[in-house]
Each structure stands twice: as structure tokens, then as C-alpha cells.
Amino acid sequence: MYRVLIIDDDSVFGGRAVRCLQHAGFSARFHHGPFGSLHAIRETGSDVVLVDVDMPRLDGGLLVKMVRDTYGLGQTFIVLVGNRPEGQLAELASSVGAHGYVSKRVPDADFVHRIQTMVGSPSNAVSLAAN
């Protein structure tokens, strides 16, 4: 079972994402805002981290770069999430080293499907860091 950590300053979205992913068989947790998120990634042993791109004072792109530069976290599987147009999300994901992106605007089933497509089925979980 994949452990997913959602890092977002929007508690409503965070709660929705946790419920959707848990319903699909993922182990999901929410961390409010960017501060303390490096510690949260380590503490939860997350396989997948969903990072909001538009958080105040520390945007998701910078947070991804920080994760990439942190010893022991550099290979973390990261997916950007946001309300921006998909083209902007794709460009940002590519430029900061994220593995992919998902729009917050998609219906819940599509949101989960996009995550499953990127990481695979939670019941067949393997280490993503090795991929």
C-alpha cells in the first residue's frame, strides 16, 4: 500500500484528497502548509508526496527543489497539484523535477485515476524511489 502525503494550505482540498485516496486503497495523510513538510515527509515515510503549487510564502515549486536537495529525500516521488491550467502545471513539474501533476479542477474519480496511472495500484505497491 502506497503512503501518500498531501501538502497543501487548503484544508478542504486536503481532506477531499485524503478521503478519495483512502477510498482507492492508498494510505493518505494531510500536512497543512509548506512549513515542516520536509520533517513530515521523513516522519510519515511517504512513498508519494502531492505538493500544492500555490502556497503562500513558500510555493510548491520551491518546496520540490528543497526536497530534491535534502539528503535522503532526493528520490521522493512528487506530484504537483494546483488550480493552474494543465500546461502551466506540466511545465512547472518538468522544471522542478516533479514526476507529474494533477489539476485540482478534475472530478474526484479522475484525480484518483491520474495518481494511480502515475504510481500504479496501491495493492501492488513497490518502491517508487527505485523507478
Image (cartoon, rainbow, N blue to C red):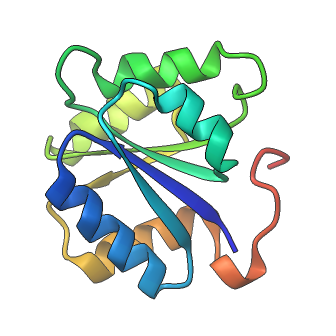
Q: Residue at x 81, y 57 (%)?
A: 127
* Rendering coords of residue 66 (x, y %): 53, 15
Q: Residue at x 22, y 39 (%)?
A: 9
Residue 31 in the figure: left or right of residue 43: left
Q: Residue at x 65, y 77 (%)?
A: 122
Residue 95 in the figure: left or right of residue 122: left
Residue 47 in the figure: left or right of residue 96: right
Residue 58 sits above or below residue 77 on the image: above
Residue 20, quarter of the rendered image: bottom left
In this rendered view, identify the residue nearer to me: 124 or 28. 28
Is residue 104 at all visible to an observer of this figure?
no
Residue 129 in the figure: left or right of residue 107: right
Q: Residue at x 14, y 61 (%)?
A: 105
Q: Quadrant of the N terminus?
A: bottom right
Is residue 122 at all visible to an observer of this figure?
yes
* Rendering coords of residue 5 (x, y %): 50, 52
Counting every numbered tag in the picture gives 0
* Rendering coords of residue 131 (x, y %): 80, 49
Residue 116 sits above or below residue 57 on the image: below
* Rendering coords of residue 46 (x, y %): 64, 50
